């Protein structure tokens, strides 16, 4: 990964797009290291200067990437000290770790829990959201789409979208539960960080983001029942996909 030097002058818009793309690449690289526990929970990430040197990007790119990781609940910045790995969810009395998502049945169980919690969160978000919440949700969906276009797994923006729904409820307990579940609650986080992706998988990810868009549309309209139904359908579809996979494995 490198910022490189442009052979010709670029416009401010092109420069911003390039910086955003580099930031997303850095987010992916760091999130894979966190999921693989090369950066275990509680450890401090390399400094901005070290990340700049290792990845060949600007401080602006590093700061945007760290901001996205923090929004996804993977890291926490302590001003004057550094940025520390939270892991796949904040430490809490209730926590679902990657080790507890080791089988398809584990994944299905967590999806059922999420259906119970997130359908109501979506309804509350529709009633209580403001423009800042909506902007952050749209940013997460744009980041998801960009990740799919670039052949990346989109786990961080996927989790970020669901966490933004929780924040929009105005009830910190929903945020606490999502943080406790962490990015491990996204079923794709069980897969290796670098896998060969088929056209079918790419189409599936685009469909997932279309479901996200339906949830966002209902939330933006203030349609609580529509948001509740869209979230339930989204999570139920994911559960059924895993149920079919489990049945096929057993067969």
Image (cartoon, rainbow, N blue to C red):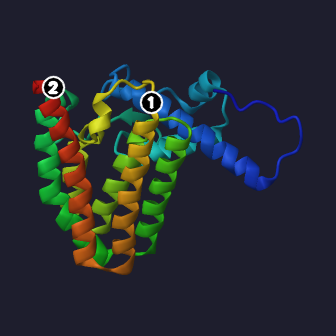
Residue on which the image places disc 1: 197
- In this view, which residue lies farthest toward the right? 8
Question: Left or right of 67: which side holds 246?
Answer: left
Between residues 244 and 13, which one lies in front from this camera angle? 244
Quarter residue 140 falls in: bottom left
Quarter residue 93 falls in: top left
Between residues 37 and 199, which one lies in front from this camera angle? 199
Which numbered disc flags the more N-terminal residue, 1 or 2?
1
Question: Left or right of 233: which side holds 73?
Answer: right
Q: Nearer the viewer, mark 1 or mark 2?
A: 2
Q: Secondary structure at mark 2?
A: helix
Question: Left or right of 220: which side holds 239?
Answer: left
Residue 96: give x, y in percent of width and height.
16, 37
Q: Secondary structure at mark 1?
A: loop
Q: Which mark is residue 185?
A: none
Between residues 169 and 59, which one lies in front from this camera angle? 169
Q: Is residue 168 visible?
A: yes
Residue 144: give x, y in percent of width and height.
46, 48
- Residue at x 12%, y 58% (from the top left corner): 116
- Residue at x 18%, y 46% (from the top left corner): 240
Q: Which mark is residue 249?
A: 2
Residue 168: give x, y in percent of width and height.
32, 67
Q: Does the residue at mark 1 contact the one at mark 2 (Cβ under 8 Å)? A: no
- Between the C-alphas of marks 1 and 2, the distance is 20 Å
- Residue at x 28%, y 29% (from the top left corner): 190
The quarter of the image holding the N terminus is: top right
Between residues 141 and 27, which one lies in front from this camera angle? 141
């Amino acid at each position: 990964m490198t910022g490189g030097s442009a052979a010709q002058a670029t416009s401010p818009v092109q420069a911003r797009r390039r910086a955003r793309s580099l930031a997303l690449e850095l987010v992916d690289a760091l999130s894979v290291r966190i999921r693989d526990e090369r950066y275990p929970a509680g450890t401090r990430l390399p400094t901005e200067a070290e990340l700049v040197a290792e990845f060949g990007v600007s401080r602006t790119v590093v700061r945007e990437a760290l901001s996205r990781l923090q929004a996804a609940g993977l890291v926490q910045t302590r001003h004057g000290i550094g940025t520390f790995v939270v892991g796949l969810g904040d430490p809490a009395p209730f926590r679902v770790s990657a080790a507890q998502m080791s089988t398809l049945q584990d994944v299905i169980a967590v999806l059922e829990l999420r259906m119970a919690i997130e359908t109501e969160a979506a309804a509350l978000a529709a009633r209580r959201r403001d423009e800042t919440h909506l902007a952050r949700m749209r940013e997460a969906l744009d980041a998801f789409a960009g990740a799919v276009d670039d052949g990346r797994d989109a786990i961080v923006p996927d989790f970020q979208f669901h966490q933004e729904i929780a924040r929009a409820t105005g009830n910190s307990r929903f945020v606490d539960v999502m943080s406790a579940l962490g990015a491990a609650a996204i079923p794709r986080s069980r897969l290796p960080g670098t896998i060969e992706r088929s056209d079918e998988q790419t189409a599936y990810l685009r469909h997932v983001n279309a479901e996200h868009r339906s949830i966002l549309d209902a939330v933006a309209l203030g349609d609580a029942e529509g948001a509740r139904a869209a979230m339930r359908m989204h999570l139920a579809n994911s559960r059924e996909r895993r149920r079919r996979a489990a049945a096929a494995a057993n067969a």
